[in-house]
Amino acid sequence: MDKRIRVLIAKPGLDGHDRGAKVVARGLRDAGMEVIYTGLRQTPEEIVKAAMQEDVDILGLSILSGAHMSVCRRVLDLMDQYDFHIPIFVGGIIPADDAEELLKMGIKAVFGPGTPISEVVKKVQEVVGQGVA
C-alpha cells in the first residue's frame, strides 16, 4: 500500500451503543488504516464536516437506531451541498430491503451484525481502490 487509508467512523443520532463501531474501528486500524472515531451522538452535519476536515478517504456510519434511511439520505445530501464526495459504508441492524435501497442511493456497502472484520477490511480496501490481490 502506498498510502494508508484514512477512515472516519461516526455514530449519528441519539443511539448510545458504540461497541460495534469501536470493534470495526480497531479492526481497520489493525489492518493498517488510519481511523478517526467521532464518538457518540453526532449530527449528519458534524459528521460531514469532520470528514472534510480530516481529509478521509471513506466514511463509516454505525446506525442501530433504525434511522439509517434518513441519516444516510441527509449525509449524502450534505456531501452534495458541500461538493465533497467520498464513499460511505454503513453498519448496523438494517433490513435487507433497506440495505438494497441504501446501495441504490450510493452507499458502497452495508454490514450487519456478525460481519467478519476481514470482510469489512477487504471491502474498504476495494472501495478506496487499494484492494489486495
Image (cartoon, rainbow, N blue to C red):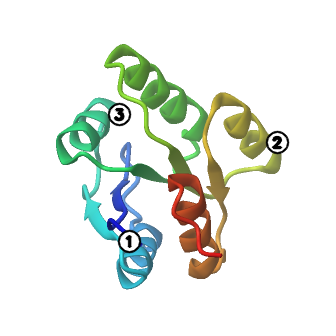
How far apart in space, not on screen, are marks 2 and 3 (Cα)?
Answer: 23 Å
Q: Which of 53 and 62 is in front in this view?
A: 53
Q: Do the residues labelled 2 and 3 touch (CB within 8 Å)?
A: no
| Residue 128 seen anywhere in this rendered image of the structure | yes
Q: Which residue lies furthest to the front in this view?
A: 2
- The kind of residue on which mark 3 rests is Pro
**Relative to residue 68, is residue 20 drawn left or right?**
left
Residue 111 as seen in the image, left or right of residue 89: right
Residue 27 location (% of width, % of height) = 44, 80
- Which residue extends farthest top? 81
Which amino acid, by three-letter code, is at mark 2?
Asp
State how far apart marks 1 and 3 are (Cα).
19 Å
Task: Identify the residue under disc 1.
Answer: 25
What residue lies at 78% left-to-right and 41% top-to-bottom?
100
Please tell me how crowded label 1 is: few (under 14), some (14-19), or many (20+) other residues with Cα within 10 Å. many
Q: Name the residue under label 3.
A: 44
**Mark found first going from the N terminus, 2 or 1:** 1
Category of crowding for the residue at label 3, using alpha-carbon neighbours closer than 10 angstroms: few (below 14), some (14–19), many (at least 20):
many
- For marks 2 and 3, the one nearer the N-term is 3
Q: In this view, does 64 lie above or below 72?
A: below
Q: Nearer the viewer, residue 133 or 67?
A: 133
Q: Earlier in the sequence, mark 1 or mark 3?
A: 1
> Disc 2 designates what residue?
97
Q: In what element is the residue under mark 1? A: helix
Residue 31 lies in quadrant: bottom left
